[in-house]
Image: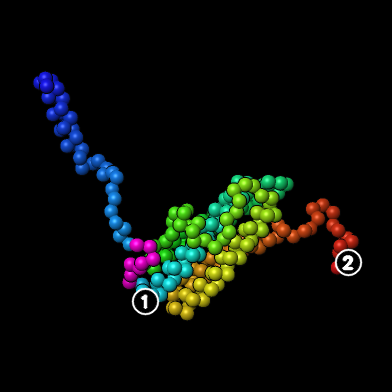
Amino acid sequence: MSPKNNKREASYNQLEEGTRHARPIQHQHAPEIQPYGKIAKLPIALDEQVCAGSAANLNQLLADTMTLRDMYKKHHWQVAGHTFYQLHLLFDKHHGVQDELVDDLAERIQVLGGISLAMAADVAETTLIPRPPRGREEAPVQISRLLEAHETILKEARTMAKQASEAGDDGTNDLIVSNVIRTNELQVWFLAEHLVDVPLVRADKGKAAAS
């Protein structure tokens, strides 16, 4: 090797050594520091079994909330018909609110010392909400699917809130009642009114008289 090449190699090595501590260490692998379903107990004055039970319930609620959130986005993109503009905006607004609930639920699970679900595959395996087709559906069918998903969440939320209260887990009970139940009830109201069969332009006097 020529003296010139030796100098170049030495210079390169010096440069490499000078930045060694500033370079990212890539492709790292190691065992999990906490397996899913296990509790890393925090000093929150709750028994570990209570934390484990609440975390398991909240992960189910989280999976279903994430599914409902994503269903809102799907319908936001795919809605069609004369109510397109109104529903396009409504679905996106509800998606944003459900996304906030996702964060609230995941953070509560972590506070309890648990591990929150995060990946789509894990959510799909856990959720109780039926998977909609990939294709586009009519707006009334989209709304019906959303109402059924809301009802699934509300049913389990009421049961889980009661269990948390009986176990003395006031934080989980408050989150479910104040955030999950009240939010889902309000969104049900906004959705359900779109499925009431009323005239758009002229009142149906015959129907009113018959009633």
Q: Nearer the viewer, residue 78 or 207?
A: 78
Residue 158 x/y as whole percent:
55, 72
Question: Which circle marks residue 103 in the picture?
Answer: none
Q: Give the magenta range.
A: 35-43
According to the picture, the residue beneath numbered tag 2 turns out to be 210
Instruction: Residue 114: give x, y in percent of width and height.
Output: 38, 65
Residue at image position (60%, 46%) is 77
Between marks 1 and 2, how big is the CA–CA gap? 61 Å
Taking the image as drawn, is residue 100 in sight? no
Image spot of residue 27 (x, y percent) = 29, 45
25 with respect to 167 (left or right): left
Please indicate whether residue 146 sits to the left or right of residue 67 in the image.
right
- What residue sits right under mark 1 in the picture? 47
Residue depicted at x 62% and y 47%: 135
Residue 20 lies in what quarter of the image? top left
Residue type, label 2: Ala
- Residue at 46 percent of width and 64 percent of height: 59
Q: Where does the C terminus fall, quadrant-wise?
A: bottom right
- Residue at the outermost left position: 3
The residue under the point 47% across, 53% down is: 120
